[in-house]
Image (cartoon, rainbow, N blue to C red):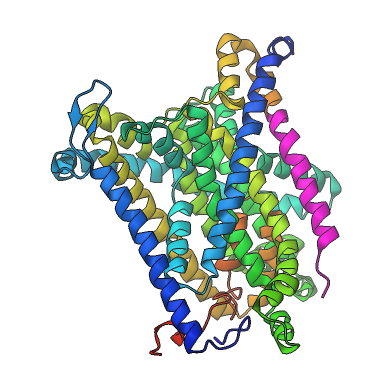
Amino acid sequence: MTNVLYDVPGPRTRRLSLIFSIVGGTVIAAGLIAVVVFLAMPRLNAAGVAQPGIFDPSRWDILLDLALWRSIWRGLLATLQMAGVAAVLAIVIGILLSMARTARSAFIRVPATVVVEFLRGMPVLLMMLFILLVFSSGAFAAGVGALALYNGAVIGEALRAGIASLPKGQRESGLAVGLTPLQVRFSIEYPQAFRQMLPIIIAQLVVLLKDTSLAYIIGYQELLNIGLRQGPTTFGAKYLFTLFFVVWGVYLAVNLLLSWIARFVARRTAAGCGGGMQARRAARVVAQLGGAGMVGAREPLDVPGAASDFTSGYQPGAGGMSGPD
Amino acid sequence: MDVIIENLPRFVDAFLVTLRLLVVSGAGALVIGTFIAALRISPVPALRGFATVYTEILRNTPLTLVLFFCAFVLPQLGIRLDYILAATIGLTLYTSPFVAEAVRSGINGVPVGQAEAARAVGLRFGQTLGLIVLPQAIRMVVPPLINVLIALTKNTSVAAGFAVFELVAVSRQVIQLNGQATIPILVAVAAFYLVITVPLGQAANALERRVRVLR
């Protein structure tokens, strides 16, 4: 892409840019090396006993212990279980809420709006606590309930925006051929809205998966709890750092995989229906409705069609940096 | 109701802690996030790569894990912070990539034609950016940024799990002493959150209408 902000760089600018690149890279590398050196230093623990540095093999030998991986697997399963149940419920709640919010009768629409706004404005942890204490439901049900309600409200808004972005003719022609309004909803509007909003819904499911870690605070035995609370007591406190890295890695792997699927789906749907324009408009609506965990901030990138010629931003041409002077 | 009036000073204290977490980490995240966004659109590949990796990693890490690191892992490395400071740092770090993405998508959202036209009439790089692109980008960035702040307000509640006595943690304490009044206490706490989030949401809507770029 040719750059619009400045002229095609000449030899001097290219050299300058190369120098900046090297300097910047060196600074970043130096920072990383400093962190590594700091971590590798032996340190005194609270009792004044010297302990080996972070990279000492004695801190990492549990990676070969099968018991560790078994417990991590147990934690991951518990996390996925909560996320899975909550995701299904959230989509169901989302469909119901989006139907209520687009109802013709104000007696349904207005209360639904209030409920959605309330649910989106509450911290998920507070909702978990509410369900846990008021219904004394146990940690799993409290976590699933709160996650389903919160993400259901967000997904409902996404679906509503998706329906709103459909051309009016879709609904009208459905009614014209004699379908009932409910049939139009389910056989014409929802399939299209769902497809358009799929990337956003998947992005929201990443948020949901991350938020299952909140259940750790109300005492559910999931990945974080098993890995970082029970791990150090089982294997020894000196492994805390190692365990942190393992748990972090597992979370990153699962979330990045889901994000990657979202991006893949976004490309697929963009190619399939060619409705990039509408999806983008709907996505903007959702992004501005926001509050979606923090998913609002990322929308414009993960959406079909939004990946226009502009996603690469103001960057100089690819050859600008590496070309010989 | 009596329980709430009786414990009002505690709730107000807790509310101030929540507010402090929000303001300090919000300001920190705005600074770091803008800096990261600048790195991401910079012409230097090394900086751009660094910013991308930073954003991707932090965005895909649960907030609970970030706070756990700041509150319990850092002390193991010999960095001892008090818990409020640890939570503030954690929230700042977690929020910064979302700020960066909001800023970046705002800048990318300015149509190419605007910059091209500015270049065509002979404005230099600084002028193009300062007079044409940024003024439009800032307007588009403000509403998403407020949404990030609303999310941050809700996220401060996670600090309750890491020995910070903000609204949720204090409500838990009060409930332990007054089991019969669980629902009113939790509703009161919810109201405290709404006191922050509703005006922010209104401000976002109002600002959006005021500063919308008409094209």
Relative to B181, residue A17 above or below:
below
- From the viewer's perspective, tell me whether residue B8 is left or right of residue A31: right
- Whether residue B130 is visible, yes or no, is yes
- From the viewer's perspective, tell me whether residue A180 is left or right of residue A148: right
Q: Where residue A271 appears, x then y in whole percent?
A: 54, 80
Q: Where residue A210 appears, x then y in whole percent?
A: 47, 46
Foreground residue among A164 and B98? B98
- From the viewer's perspective, tell me whether residue A224 is left or right of residue A305: left
Q: Is residue A239 magenta?
A: no
- The quarter in which the C terminus of chain A is drawn is bottom left
Relative to B45, residue A93 above or below:
above
Q: Quadrant of residue B196?
A: top right
Residue at the image point whose x is 73% and y is 80% from the top: B114
Residue at the image point whose x is 67% and y is 53% from the top: B145
Q: Where residue B84 appears, x then y in whole percent?
A: 52, 29
Q: Quadrant of residue A46?
A: top left
Q: Where residue B45 appears, x then y in whole percent?
A: 44, 73
Foreground residue among A210 and B69? B69
- Magenta range: B190-215
Q: How many marks?
A: 0
Residue at the image point whose x is 55% and y is 70% from the top: B41
Q: Residue furthest front?
A: A12
Relative to A244, residue B84 above or below:
above
Q: Main secondary structure of the magenta part?
A: helix
Q: Is residue B197 magenta?
A: yes
